[in-house]
Amino acid sequence: MGEVEVVVERTVAAPIGEVFARLADIEGHNTWVPGRASILRGTRQTSPGPVAVGTTYEDRTRMGTLPGDVAELDPPRRIVYHWWDRGPSGRTKMEGWPGYTLEAVGERETLVRHDARLRANGIRALGAPVLRILVRRERTATMDALVRSFA
């Protein structure tokens, strides 16, 4: 099994509540997540109601559609998403846990620590060094887009 962990930090020029609300708005990601600089093409919430632990969604990516759910939610400090890619046999090929930890830095700034963990199984585990580069690039583009969305 190939494990990849990446951490990217940015300071966002907005209050912690506003930053958290943007990160927790699953379909709102479509308005600020980077386009060509990202693997992600779009996100859709697939369960009704407000976002809570267990809320489900689908990410349309360059590699296809990936299901996911909200794994952890502690407003306005922490949110963790969980996505997975399963083969026809039902075995998990890859799964990831992109999480965000927020800390108020004054009234109008928020430090966002984006920790992303990826697990590749089977033959994909051999690609962990390359996956680490791709995950860092993707997570950096996402964090830069988050900062720009408040500019």
Image (cartoon, rainbow, N blue to C red):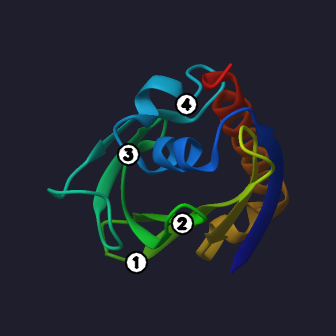
Compared across the picture, whether 115 is left or right of 30 comes to right
Q: Which is more toward the observer, 76 or 27?
A: 76
Classed neighbour count for the residue bearing mark 4: other residues with Cα under 10 Å, few (<14), some (14–19), many (≥20): many
Could you say whether the residue bearing mark 1 is in a helix, strand or loop? Answer: loop
- What type is the residue that disc 1 sits on? Arg
Q: Which is more toward the observer, 32 or 58?
A: 32
Give the spatial CA distance, label 4 vs label 1.
29 Å
First in residue order: circle 4 vs circle 2: 4
**According to the image, label 4 marks what residue?**
33
Compared across the picture, whether 60 is left or right of 137 comes to left
First in residue order: circle 3 vs circle 1: 3
State the residue at coordinates (31%, 74%). Answer: 89
Picture quadrant where residue 104 is located: bottom right
Classed neighbour count for the residue bearing mark 1: other residues with Cα under 10 Å, few (<14), some (14–19), many (≥20): few
Q: Position of residue 100 (x, y in %)?
A: 64, 59
**According to the image, label 3 marks what residue?**
26
User: In this rendering, is residue 81 above or below 149?
Assistant: below
Q: Give yes or no for contact between labels 2 and 3 (Cβ–Cβ under 8 Å).
A: no
- What type is the residue that disc 3 sits on? Ile
Give the spatial CA distance, label 2 vs label 3.
12 Å
**According to the image, label 1 marks what residue?**
91
Q: Give yes or no for contact between labels 2 and 1 (Cβ–Cβ under 8 Å).
A: no
**According to the image, label 2 marks what residue?**
80
- What type is the residue that disc 2 sits on? Val
